[in-house]
Amino acid sequence: MTRNILTACLAVILAFVAGCRQEGGPPPAAPPPAAPPSAPEPVAEETAANPLQVPIPNARMLADDVLSGGQPTVEQFEQAAAAGFRTVVNLRTPGEEGVWDEAPKAEELGLRYVAIPVAGVEGLTVENARDLAEIFDDPGARPLMIHCGSGNRIGALFALKAYHLDDESTEAALEIGRNAGLTRLELEEVVKERLESSSE
């Protein structure tokens, strides 16, 4: 009797276990191992020039967003507009060699155009330096491109600005002028004489 009961219990247990296996099904397969992370692609070295460095003659960056230099071409005007410039300042006079009519092209490209004619040495005045300084100091005018024939008049006006408007010493003003494009020694001598005479 006892043996029959044990046999029956064992049969029930085996049937129960078999049923559980059928309901649960085979255990889920283990997920495949994650692939090792791929190495990052090498970053190409930056070879493009600063977008503000439109290749005008004797190009200089007077600030992060102020380019100065010599006479730009029509194509360089287009490059300036494409690079995001807002303003072009021209220090040349209409009768100079190599001058072309920039104002209509600037208007076509959506550039603000400002003419401050500096007629050689006679045009190196505090008034012209002040007019240039107003534009240079205006954040709304930037990015800004300033040009003359070679960049020398730009440097001369910045020397005058430094001395008369920023209270720099004669030598400091001349150094500022050199950094801004004043490379002709004879023109630097003229600027120096004017700075020294104005301090007497």
Image: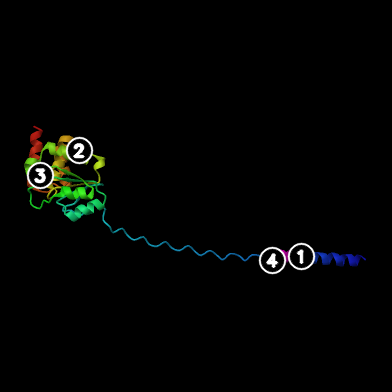
Mark 4 vs mark 3, CA separation in Å? 94 Å
Q: Is residue 21 left or right of residue 76?
A: right
Outermost residue to the right: 1
Mark 4 vs mark 2, CA separation in Å? 84 Å
Task: Tell me, yes or no, whether the highlighted magenta stretch contains residue 100.
Answer: no
Of the image marks 3 and 1, the number of the one nearer the N terminus: 1
Kind of residue indicated by mark 2: Glu
Residue at numbered disc 3: 188
Q: Label 1's element?
A: helix
Residue at numbered disc 4: 25
Of the image marks 1 and 4, the number of the one nearer the N terminus: 1
Residue at numbered disc 1: 17
Kind of residue indicated by mark 1: Val
Residue at numbered disc 2: 134
Of labels 4 and 3, the one closer to you: 4
**What stretch of residues is rendered in magenta?**
17-23
Q: Quadrant of the C terminus?
A: top left
